[in-house]
Amino acid sequence: MRKKIYIDAGHNDRGWNTGASGNGLKEQDITFETAFFLSKILSLDFDVRLSRPTKETNLGKDNSSSINARWSGANEWGADYFISIHVNAGGGTGSETYFYKDNAKRGQDSEVFAKTVNDIFAQAMGLKNRGVKLDTQAAVGSISVLRNTKMPAILIELSFIDSPLTNPDVTILRDRRKEMANALSEGIFKHLGKGVPRPVASAPVAPALQTVPFNLMGRMAQIEGQITDGTTFVAARQLLEELGYKVDWVAEKRTIVVQK
């Protein structure tokens, strides 16, 4: 039976629970694209689910419910492994990975899982290896998605979004997202004894977004989307919100709820 891996792209696209920013980059963009590429690699050998299936997906109604939706989604799906992808801030350099340690097998497996993924990722990307840490060592004091998941779970900080440009961190976050996904997949494959993953170069690439001008009953609005072969695709949430609708994502039912 194929293992089930839940990939959490840290933070929301906009509104609440958005991520760090620096050097012209946004954490939520980096985590989504890296998670997207990683899902394409892993789906060849595992069952995969993304917490944010599209870039514009916003989880919850505030910071707390956004975080809860991630671990509850993994638990309800019955995931075998959980990985949350983030980037660091504070001007440092390198990658580090957090886990929650308890006396159960889950905690022990989480520690090994964290070390394997972090070591391979740091080496593959040429980053300083800051090691693995208990969730209580995080700036927030403890990490909910690690404490409340029922399966082995890790949270990786890929590198520092506000690192000085003399370090490799920002260039990697900006230009090497496919490579980061490949490196993460190598760590996951090694931990699960699956050999060598196929590179993301053979997987579909996330479509590039642009802004599409809309005349909404006399009022101009710029909506994220793309025009392909004469067909216009736009972000449904943003368009509906511009029209005055309230849009919510119900993670446990994987359903979008639209209300006037």
Image (cartoon, helix red, strand yellow):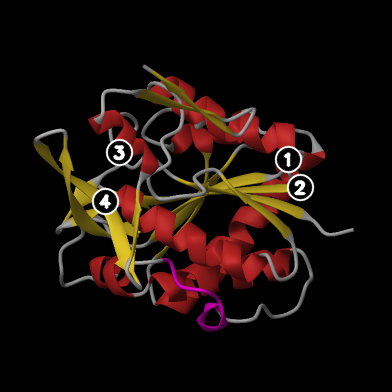
Q: Is residue 103 above or below residue 97?
A: above
Label 4 CA crowd tier, 10 Å (few <14, some 14–19, many 20+): some
Quick check: 191 left or right of 166?
A: right
The answer for how far apart the CA atoms under marks 2 and 3 are is: 33 Å
**Depth check, front residue: 103 or 237:** 237
The quarter of the picture where residue 107 lies is top right
Give coordinates of residue 189: x percent, y percent. Answer: 70, 69
Tag 4–tag 2 contact (CB < 8 Å): no
Residue 41 among those drawn in magenta = no
Residue sitting at 62 percent across and 73 percent down?
Answer: 186
The mark found on residue 151 in the picture is 1
Tag 4–tag 3 contact (CB < 8 Å): yes
Which element carries disc 2, helix, strand or loop? loop
Tag 1–tag 2 contact (CB < 8 Å): yes
Residue sitting at 33 percent across and 32 percent down?
Answer: 240
The answer for how far apart the CA atoms under marks 4 and 3 are is: 8 Å
Return the residue at label 4.
224
- Magenta region: 200-206
Q: What's the amino acid at mark 1? A: Met
The mark found on residue 238 in the picture is 3
The answer for how far apart the CA atoms under marks 1 and 4 are is: 36 Å
Residue sitting at 45 percent across and 70 percent down?
Answer: 180
Please tell me which of labels 4 and 2 falls first in the chain.
2
Please tell me which of labels 1 and 4 falls first in the chain.
1
Is the C terminus in the top left, top right, bottom left or bottom right quadrant?
A: top left
Return the residue at label 2.
80
